[in-house]
Amino acid sequence: MTVFYRKYRPQKFDQIVGQKQIVATLLSQLKSGKIGHGYLFAGPRGTGKTSCARILAKAVNCQGLGSRKLGSSKKTLETKFSEPCNKCDSCLAISAGFHLDLIEIDAASNRGIEEIRDLREKIKLAPVAGKYKVYIIDEAHMLTPEAFNALLKTLEEPPAHAIFILCTTLPAKLPSTIISRLQRFNFARAQASEISQTIQNIAKSEAIKISEGAVLAIVSAADGSFRDAVSILDQLSSVRKTVEAKDVLAIAAISGWDQLYNFVEQLAKNQIKSAVLTIEELSQSGADMSLFAREVILFFEKLLLFKIGIALENFDLDGLQIEKIKNLASEFKSGDLQNLMKLFLIAEGEIKLYPLPQIPLVLAVCKYAGPIDEQMVVDKQPFEAQTETNESQSKVIIQSRKTDEDKMEIKSKKTSKSLVSFEKKWQEFLNKVKPLNAHVVALLRSTRPVAFDGADLTLEVFYRFHKEKLEEPKILTVLGKVMEEVIGSPIKLKFVLATKKSSEPAAVKVSDVVDINQFELEKAVAEIFSKP
């Protein structure tokens, strides 16, 4: 029994769905006889790239073309190429997959330079049965750089009887030198209505009863791919002739519309715990978390588009769903929706990096909720006992603090006054150090004066690596001498590592720190000590 995807694969250009502009251009080239030597078919998976390439191979080698009768008259129309007839030996051989002049190469498994060199040798030979030798290189982005270089020579000077068709889902990975020698056609992701119609047509042909909800679920799971949609229907029809939405949800690892709505509603009402539990339940049930993230992002998009005045009737939604989205949109501000879309876009990209795919989504929800109050999650004592304890402790703490404050008050006032006066000298100090070594200044800008009593200066450093560099004897010597020039008296420098980074100065690049010129420092030391 033939699987649906093969059985219902397009065999003519007019059977290709959703690529009208591409089909029109190729047919125009065929009818005019202006066939290119190289094509690039780029686009998402399951949009008809390889099918279109095979149909093009049929058309240029079809034996049923040449002269065709015009209706019942005796006149004939001479055509160079057109739609393949699908009846001649050449068309039938290509459909069956054993035509000698159609060479299909899977670049994922034949990606090396040796395979391309072998291709270059064989391409010189004339076609065996047809007019053209057609090479279809699928997943072309998988070829190695060496293989691309070898292929480039052939694309620059191709034999007249050869046509190359490169198919890829990632055209950005192809070298620009390759792309510039090909005619590029961008295949669009299939529209929901197109996939829906295709599914219904196949179901009717196969006598499968399928509910409207099941069709919508298949469309959602297919994510713009005809192949995925047909494969899901094929899988379901193998065990039942009546397909419901719950059957699709069970095998496609996707979430239903109601589940999506409930999740987004939880975010709207700031029910963070419920939202996290929903993610965990989906993960435990085996749902595809990447697909769930994309569905959530698209849901946010619909809410945002509605808020800016775009009619929801343009989407594949029923009346009840449209009404629910309108009500839910009022719960969000546009800024919140934009923030959520960004968070989930980042999370969707990080899912493949985590061994537990639900973690990025949980983090996205928590980030949206804002900082978690630690007091909310700490086990608390009974109120009465806690009050008594707090009252007794507070008396001791207040007395202790008062004593400490009395001792430190005089010293604190003196230190703060000196520090304020020193801050005026800080920029002058940095300006004098900069000509000696700009990299040391970069380090100093990542510090902060915290104490100065006229003889000792304490600088707070936010990174251990910076502290170690600044405490090197040669650097410390230079800084001490420059500080003495600025203040007018010897100053002892002390560096302390900060305990918190919440209010640290602007970050310093690692390159600014690593490249501290040893010669400059030695020269600076020599100049300072040579002064009278």
Image (tube, grey):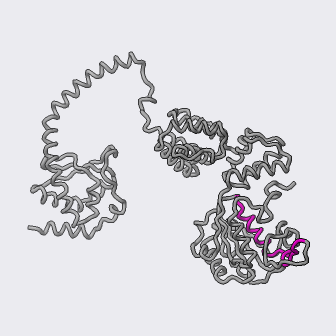
Residue 516 horizontal side relative to residue 227, left or right: left
Q: Nearer the viewer, residue 2 or 532?
A: 2
Q: Is residue 356 visible?
A: no
Q: Is residue 301 above or below residue 59?
A: above
Q: Which quadrant of the rendered structure holds the C terminus?
A: bottom left
Which residue appears at 69% of the width and 77% of the height? 36
Which residue appears at 16% of the width and 46% of the height? 420
Q: Position of residue 131 (x, y in %)?
A: 80, 80
Q: Is residue 145 visible?
A: yes
Q: Which quadrant of the rendered structure holds the N terminus?
A: bottom right
Q: Give the residue furthest to the left.
A: 532
What segment carries the magenta color? 46-71
Residue 263 horizontal side relative to residue 424, left or right: right
Q: Is residue 417 above or below residue 3?
A: above
Quadrant of res 62: bottom right
Residue 475 horizontal side relative to residue 39, left or right: left
Which residue appears at 66% of the width and 46% of the height? 316
Q: Tell whether position 14 is magenta.
A: no
Q: Position of residue 246 (x, y in %)?
A: 73, 38
Which residue appears at 86% of the width and 78% of the height? 76
Quadrant of res 436: bottom left
Q: Position of residue 451 (x, y in %)?
A: 19, 46
Q: Tell whether position 54 is magenta.
A: yes
Q: Nearer the viewer, residue 430 or 368?
A: 368
Q: Position of residue 90 (x, y in %)?
A: 85, 73
Q: Is residue 86 above or below residue 323?
A: below
Figure label count:
0
Residue 124 horizontal side relative to residue 367, left or right: right
